[in-house]
Structures are given as structure tokens and as C-alpha cells.
């Protein structure tokens, strides 16, 4: 039911994007997170948007101890130079991702992309990285109708004025959604799922890998390992939400 509501609001906004601003007068506006009547993100959702600490660990973004140490395990970031994630995957942050991903809500996507761009401008360590989206399998693309990581990567490339290389990675094997109960090992689920199609686009360059969320990190590690093996100098990871 929630998905249906989200999809309806998303479709409404999608058509509005297609038809231009004139439709705004005829269609009621909804908060892109909770779908309540609102122009843009409603005040309660804005209030419960869980932002991650601004001065966290330089590698993983988690809060530091008073003595400046990070206690989070960095093994989840193997081959990843830095993880930048402005929001927690909870409350309004999680709802925005679902509206965007499942409902195709472009306003939710724009808000997430803006949070990501601001966070990268503030914390990003690589100076001029090449933006590469985590790829979606063709079958999933057909089901969903759009590729959320590619959409975000294109937008971020434009707003950060960075070179975008959308077809560097390909998903050559369909994987089950990482959150599904039947997925016992997230690492095994993505093993052999990706391929570097255009190694020359990343050879000797810093790469900024883009996805919507970071949960176990298995997908990002698999992509980062391949990009490094293809000659990328470093791989940083930019996502909207971290669980
Ligand atoms: Zn709301
Ligand atoms: Zn850390």
C-alpha cells in the first residue's frame, strides 16, 4: 500500500516534469518523503532527516571519540579510499530513497542529489574524480524503468562539474536485492556480478563511485576491487544514505 501511494505521487511528479510547470496548478503537491500535502519536503520530515556528523572520521564519516579516534570497522571499506554519505538510511532519509527508487519520484531524487553534492564539496578528498555509477542489471532496469544510481551520477557530474563515465561498470549477473531474507551472504551474492567494460576510462584516475545507499558495503567493495584492478588510482564512494 505504501509503495502504491509512493508510486502514485512519483508518477504525478514524473508527469509534471514531462509536461512542465503548468500542471503544478492542477495537481496537489506532496512531500517526497511521507506524501503529506506539502510543497517540497514537509517540516516534520525535514526535522527528522538524520544527517551524519559533519566532522566525523575522514575515511568512513562515523563520529569520532573525544580523543579523535574512529571505532567503526574500516574493513567494510576495503579498496575504498573514503565513504561520503550525508544521511542515515532511517526516517525521512529512508523514505526519500524509497520514493525515489520505487516510485521514480524526481523531487526525492533531486533532494538526495543535492545532499550528496553538498557533502562531497565539504568532505570529498579526491580532487577531480571520474564519476562512475554502480550499475543495475538489465532485467532490473526493465522492471523499475530507470536506473537510480546512473540518474544520481549524471546529476552529480553536472553539479560538481566532474567527468562522468556511466558505462565503465556493467552488472553481468543479476543478483537478488541485498536486503532480501534469502541472501545469507551479501558478499557471495555479488561475487562475479560486475565487470569493468571500459578500463581505459578509469586507468590512472581517481574514481567516485555513486550509489543510493550503503548497507553491508558488499556491492561497493566488489566494484571498488574491480576498478582498482583495472588501474584506478583510488575509488571513493558517494551515497545518499548509510544504514
Ligand atoms: Zn513529509
Ligand atoms: Zn572511520
Image (cartoon, rainbow, N blue to C red):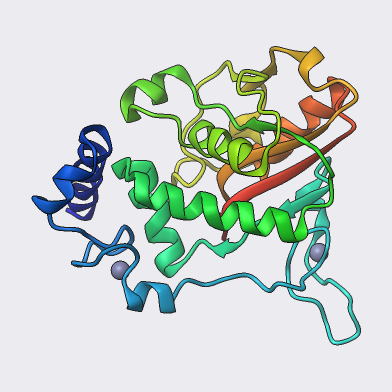
Q: Residue at image x 53%, y 54%? A: 114
Where on the picture, by quarter, is residue 123?
bottom right
Quarter of the image for the C terminus: give it: bottom right
Where on the picture, by quarter, is residue 74?
bottom right
Task: Depth check: give the residue in front, 22 or 218.
Answer: 22
Name of the residue lying farthest toward the left: 26
Residue 101, percent from left and from top: 39, 43
**205 relative position to 197: left or right:** right
Q: Residue at image x 67%, y 21%? A: 192
Q: Is residue 233 visible?
A: yes
Q: Is residue 185 visible?
A: no
Task: Depth check: give the residue in front, 148 or 41.
Answer: 41
Image vertical order of residue 41 relative to residue 165, above or below: below
Residue 179, percent from left and from top: 48, 47
Where on the picture, by quarter, is residue 80?
top right
Looking at the rendering, the quadrant in which ligand 2 lies is bottom right
Residue 186, percent from left and from top: 60, 41
**140 relative position to 112: left or right:** left
Amino acid at each position: 500500500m505504501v509503495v502504491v501511494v509512493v508510486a502514485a505521487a512519483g508518477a504525478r511528479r514524473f508527469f509534471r516534469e514531462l509536461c512542465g510547470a503548468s500542471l503544478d496548478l492542477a495537481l496537489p503537491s506532496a512531500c517526497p518523503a511521507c506524501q503529506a500535502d506539502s510543497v517540497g519536503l514537509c517540516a516534520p520530515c525535514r526535522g527528522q532527516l538524520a544527517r551524519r556528523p559533519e566532522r566525523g572520521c575522514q575515511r568512513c564519516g562515523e563520529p569520532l571519540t573525544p580523543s579523535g579516534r574512529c571505532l567503526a570497522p574500516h574493513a567494510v571499506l576495503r579498496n575504498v579510499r573514503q565513504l561520503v554519505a550525508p544521511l542515515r538510511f532511517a526516517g525521512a532519509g529512508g523514505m526519500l530513497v524509497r520514493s525515489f527508487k520505487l516510485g521514480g519520484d524526481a523531487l526525492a531524487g533531486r533532494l538526495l542529489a543535492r545532499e550528496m553534492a553538498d557533502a562531497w564539496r565539504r568532505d570529498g578528498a579526491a580532487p577531480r574524480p571520474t564519476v562512475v555509477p554502480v550499475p543495475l542489471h538489465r532485467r532490473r532496469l526493465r522492471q523499475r524503468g530507470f536506473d537510480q544510481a546512473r540518474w544520481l551520477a549524471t546529476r552529480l557530474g553536472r553539479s560538481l562539474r566532474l567527468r562522468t563515465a556511466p558505462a565503465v561498470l556493467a552488472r553481468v549477473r543479476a543478483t537478488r536485492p541485498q536486503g532480501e531474507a534469502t541472501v545469507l551472504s551479501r558478499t557471495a551474492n555479488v561475487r562475479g556480478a560486475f565487470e569493468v567494460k571500459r578500463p581505459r576510462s578509469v586507468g590512472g584516475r581517481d574514481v567516485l563511485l555513486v550509489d543510493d545507499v550503503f548497507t553491508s558495503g558488499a556491492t561497493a567493495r566488489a566494484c571498488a576491487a574491480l576498478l582498482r584492478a583495472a588501474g584506478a588510482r583510488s575509488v571513493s564512494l558517494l551515497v545518499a544514505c548509510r544504514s
